[in-house]
Image (cartoon, rainbow, N blue to C red):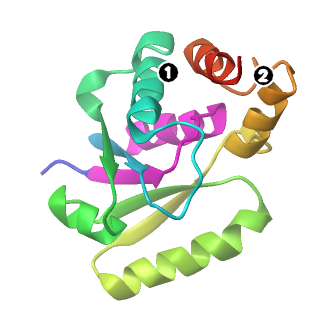
Amino acid sequence: MKKIAIYPGTFDPITFGHIDVIKKGLKLFDKLVVAVSDGENKDYLFSKDERIEIIYKALFSDLKLKKKKIEIISFTSLTTDLCRKYKSNIILRGLRAVSDFEYEFQLAGMNRKLNSNIETLFLMSDVENQIISSKFVKEIVKLKGDIKKFTTKSTIKSLKDKYE
């Protein structure tokens, strides 16, 4: 039986922190579903379709990761419903700093209450990527700063195109 994990997030845009979690997840699972949230309660820079395209280019064109192990989708449902759809009992989440933990702990607890068969697995990005957030990357590029250390070439192009 294939071990499938769901990695939900907004990915607005994808960063090297997200990519660290994806790479580590690929070592642990047979398949990773990168699930792009399209909830209405967020103000996104990129549309759902743009975010999916950016992730696709970052993972498969820039980094040459294996397509057969990764599926990129969008969703508006509960993550637990997504787990049921993909026959997964693992939600993968990234942690950068202690400040992430409280929110993630509560989220994991709520998901566990919604479906007691689901486990949330927390992975840390590498130390050099723990400070990266999509919010900061957008702010830096908006102010014409250098973001090469934070995300892939194609993502940088998408960001610059958006702000120019």
**Image point (26%, 63%), residue name:** 83
Residue highlighted by disc 1: 58
> Number of labelled discs?
2
**Image point (27%, 78%), residue name:** 117
**Three-letter code for the amino acid on which mark 1 is drawn:** Ala
Asked if the stretch drawn in magenta spans residue 22, the answer is yes
Outermost residue, left side: 1
Left or right: where 86 falls relative to 8: left
Q: CA distance from mark 1 to mark 2?
A: 14 Å
Q: Which residues are magenta?
A: 4-29
Asked if the stretch drawn in magenta spans residue 68, the answer is no
**Image point (38%, 88%), residue name:** 113
Q: Is residue 77 above or below residue 68?
A: below
**Three-letter code for the amino acid on which mark 2 is drawn:** Ile
Whether pointer 1 and pointer 2 mark residues with C-beta atoms closer than 8 Å, the reply is no
Q: Is residue 61 above or below residue 72?
A: above
Residue highlighted by disc 2: 147
At numbered mark 1, what does the secondary structure look like: helix, strand or loop? helix
